[in-house]
Image: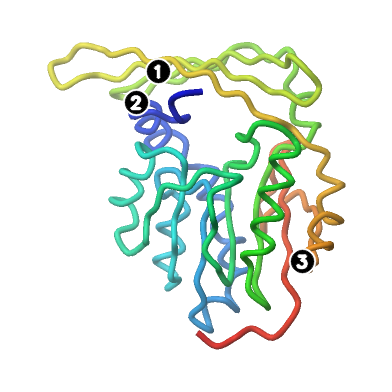
Amino acid sequence: MSEPYYGADLALVHDRGFGFHAERCAPGVLALLEPVRERGGLVLEVGAGTGLLTRHLVAAGHRVVATDASPAMLERARDAAPGADVRVLALPDDPLPAADAIVGVGHPLNYVADAAAVHRGLVAMARALRPGGRLVLDLCDLRWADARRGDPPFARVGDDWAIVTRFDVPAPDRFVRDITTFVRAPEGTWRRADERHENVLVDASKLPGLLAAEGVDARIVTGVGDAELPDGLVAVTGARAGPAAPS
């Protein structure tokens, strides 16, 4: 596709109406990263979006490089977390900086082209992780589509925005959302925008073995801290062996 996901209008709607996932996951992510914070390590956030998790990382005292493929999302992240180093980065092939932790919520790796690209992205993250580093990343398993097959359209309205989403499962490893947003302009008119989001789904049970080959001991869990994830959304949590270097 010629344009990245999450243009300006959808970025606004996401920021104002859909922060609940990052809010629920933030305490668990921060708990897992406490050893990294204590030694002043660097946190690389992938799929940072509008900075909904980033602001919690910065407020907790972390040094953060916040990345996303959407410039519109990152414009809002700069306002949400001014202490972060905010950069455009597209998974799975843009170079990743070396980091003491890599985190991501909102299933950013499911936005790549296929399962091979998911694996390539995870390998890149493993290789960017320093000794003693931590990995916390959520993603959609194959069960994500099964749990939502046949769901009716979703609609939600805010004070100055509205969103309608229609769902499709064209293949067992594909989940498609056709998203229409309406945003109120300053003069009172409403502007419409449409995006089609195609997510690749993967068999998460294969991922710990993939990461183990890169020196990262990982497991698949259904929650982050006390936050249980929706059916079909899982988290990959792990660590690279070795003594952590002082920062």
Q: Is there CB contact under 8 Å for labels 3 and 1?
A: no
Counting other residues with Cα less than 10 Å from the Cα at mark 2, is it few (<14), some (14-19), or many (20 or more)?
many
On the picture, is 21 further left or further right than 136?
left
Q: How is the image coloured?
A: rainbow
Residue that appears at 35% across and 36% down = 72
The disc placed on residue 216 is 3
* Residue type indicated by callout 2: Asp
Residue 70 locus on image (x, y percent): 42, 38
The disc placed on residue 9 is 2
Which one is nearer the viewer's eye here, 222 or 128? Answer: 128
User: Which residue is the site of mark 1?
Assistant: 181
* Residue type indicated by callout 3: Val
Q: Is there CB contact under 8 Å for labels 2 and 1?
A: yes
Figure check: 132 above or below 116: below
* Residue type indicated by callout 1: Thr
Residue 197 locus on image (x, y percent): 56, 23
